[in-house]
Amino acid sequence: MQKLKLAVLVSGSGTNLQSLIDAQKEGYFNSEIALVVSNKASAYGLTRAENAGIKALVIKSDKELLDALLENEIDLIVLAGYLKVISSELINAYENKIINIHPSLLPEYGGHGMYGLYVHEKVFADKKDQTGATVHYVTAEVDEGPIIIQKKLIVDYDVIKSPEELQKAVLVIEHQILKEAIKIIEEQ
Ligand code: GRF
């Protein structure tokens, strides 16, 4: 069982980051969140990191990001609501060591422009009877890397009345499978 040094990249609220912080505290996995990075100084995820005593950085360039990851000897990068496209230089430097959580059952509702609430608005408009979330490896093709874990949500439209409610329901699944993905990778 490996013990990995994780960097979690966020652009917003950071509820997925929080689920990893809580999982680490509970001993759910062996790995350690060593660094949290955001491209937005206003990201609440940075506050979650500071509250948990984790080093948090606001980064503006891909070079700065790569330097910080190497400096902190990061083993695995977790994209958790990070809305900036990752450079090919970083993908090459961390081949098969970058994972992303996406709020749909990829390959459905993935790709450029498909992120956050947009995904749920599309699923809701299409009245899909199921959706879910996916953790996958990051490659040069957005949302097309090998899948590590997926989990389905059967959508009950008598209960789920809006894209926002769908997003909330899918986030619960995201928080579950993201920590499971870390454990799967530790055991490889
Ligand atoms: C999540 O739904 C994630 O799948 C998507 O962006 C959202 C981020 O949520 N990429 P949070 O910041 O972790 O709460």
Image: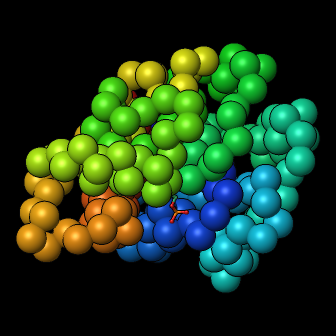
159 relative position to 121: left or right: left
Image quadrant where residue 92 sits: top right
- Residue farthest to the bottom, as pictured: 51
| Quadrant of the frame with the N terminus | top left
Q: Position of residue 174 (x, y in %)?
A: 35, 56
Position of 20 relative to 184 (above/below): below
Residue in the picture at 67% in, 74% down: 44
| Nearer the observer, 133 or 21 | 133
Image quadrant where residue 32 sits: bottom right
Position of 141 relative to 56 (above/below): above
Residue in the picture at 41% in, 47% down: 119
Image quadrant where residue 50 sits: bottom right
159 relative position to 80: left or right: left
| Nearer the observer, 123 or 40 | 123
Q: Position of residue 161 (x, y in %)?
A: 23, 71
Q: Position of residue 185 (x, y in %)?
A: 40, 37
Q: Is residue 80 visible?
A: yes
Colour approach in the figure = rainbow
Residue in the picture at 57% in, 45% down: 79
Q: Position of residue 103 (x, y in %)?
A: 38, 48
Position of 154 relative to 184 (above/below): below
| Nearer the observer, 87 or 48 | 87
- Residue farthest to the front, as pictured: 125
Q: Is residue 5 visible?
A: no
46 relative position to 173: left or right: right
| Quadrant of the frame with the C terminus | top left
Residue in the picture at 38% in, 68% down: 164
Please count the marks in the image: 0
